[in-house]
Amino acid sequence: MALKTLSAKAAAALDKELMSTGAFSIDQLMELAGLSVSQAVYRVHPIEKGKRVLVAVGPGNNGGDGLVAARHLRHYGYQPSVYYPKRPKNDLYQRLAKQLEDLNIPFVDDFPTALQSTDHIVDAIFGFSFSGEVREPFPAVIQAMSETKLTVTSVDAPSSWDIEDGPPKSGVGSDFHPSVLVSLTAPKPLVKHFRGRHFVGGRFVAPEIARKYDFEVPEYEGIDQVVEIGPGGQKL
Amino acid sequence: MALKTLSAKAAAALDKELMSTGAFSIDQLMELAGLSVSQAVYRVHPIEKGKRVLVAVGPGNNGGDGLVAARHLRHYGYQPSVYYPKRPKNDLYQRLAKQLEDLNIPFVDDFPTALQSTDHIVDAIFGFSFSGEVREPFPAVIQAMSETKLTVTSVDAPSSWDIEDGPPKSGVGSDFHPSVLVSLTAPKPLVKHFRGRHFVGGRFVAPEIARKYDFEVPEYEGIDQVVEIGPGGQKL
């Protein structure tokens, strides 16, 4: 039996509730989400497979999770580099980027070129709030991630996929099938189209909140911040 | 050779720098510090040894780390309870306490009684900014922690100890020797008087900041947020 999924609308309402009645700050939630992503990368791409990790960062919260993951990966001994073409003025994202600069993590301008000299890719471009068209400069980035033979780990959603319906029927992203997905708090409906290794992260949801939003908190092991489940959300 | 220690003054300056030029928010740092503490507890007191963990929480940042640790311990499957007699109006601490209430973590009023029905104690009363006298109601708490046969894990400093000189020569705390200490970012000078299991946590310091404050970032393993070192700070 598969874990229940969380629609885009429910995921947005859950985030709002965690930060209001749940009393979490976005700094806290993003720290724990990004930590989850870094642990999934460590699991699927141990450091012996190659230290270089290219993190593609979008303009919203999904991108923020990617910035946090890049920092933790650096502390684990990886050599992350970050592609962050659209930097919002938002104070939190600016601070997360500064934390990376202080670790001498390079920011790269040309994604397809940077992809030629990395060992792993993290796709933190768009998350559950994405819908509609992929805007510039991201079509070429998603195209490059569709064509690469490298392992791509997507954060919460393969970027360009519709949260309910999965990959677009044509155009940018229609051929994008990342090898790894880290669903945050709960899988989204798009996982029915996903075929790779699938993790759930974000170990901060109280059971009552999960009940209210009608999803299950998976059984994490020990102190892990991620748990591996089946591609479509099945328990392993 | 022992890791270099960080004086109370240097630790305060480091915290200030991390939150100004370092661009960290206190939410982030406290989340990672509390996570470190929870991982050390998991290491020294695996859940099979008994699920009940009593967390003694002081009025400042050390207490905040304890609140975060209690939340993570709950998610790991422990049954924490929290003694939090002096609750400041500070928004962050109120939110961290609310997060525990939402997990149905009990807050207890009588520490010596609560201590009779727990398996492990976390001492998050005072940290590196403590000096002088132990104020009410904490003398009886420290006395109870001095007398118990249970394992006590202290956060950053055994509460009541002078950060430079260690245990007070007489009175409250002079007999307090916790079994476990989690030094945050770097050991404090008091560790020369400590004889138990010693961990360093707080895996977020950039090497340049550590150089500036003349301490070493220890070699953490894998994705661990703590590393065990010798009682006085020796590398193991």
Image: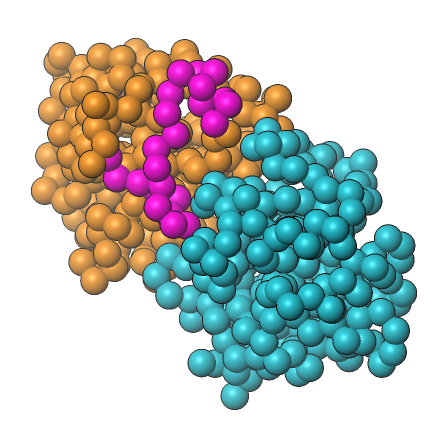
Chain colours: A cyan, B orange
The answer to if B221 sits in the magenta stretch is yes
The foreground one among A112 and A187 is A112
Say if B44 sits above or below B129 in the image.
below
Quadrant hosting residue A101 = top right
- Evaluate whether residue B129 shows in this view: no
Left or right for A139, reference B201: right
Rendered position, A51 above or below A11 = above
> Which residue is rendered at x = 76% and y = 54% of the image?
A112
Span colored in magenta: B207-229
* Residue that extends furthest to the bottom in the rendered view of this protein: A1
Pinpoint residue B21: horizontal percent, then vertical percent: 62, 21
Query: What is the x, y in percent for residue B190?
Result: 24, 19
Residue B81 position, x and y percent, is 33, 50
Task: Say whether residue B113 is left or right of residue A58.
Answer: left
Answer whether residue B163 is magenta in the image: no
Q: Is residue A72 left or right of residue A54?
A: left
Query: In this rendering, is residue A95 above or below A205?
Result: above
- Residue depicted at 69% across the width and 82% down the height: A193
Q: Foreground residue, B38 or B79?
A: B38
User: Dividing the image into 4 quarters, which one contains the C terminus of chain B?
Assistant: top left
Relative image position of residue B8 (x, y in whole percent): 37, 15
Whether residue B3 is visible, yes or no, is: yes
Q: Residue at x 38, y 20 (%)?
A: B215
Instruction: Give the camera-side residue of A156 and A110.
Output: A110
Image point (72%, 64%), residue name: A145
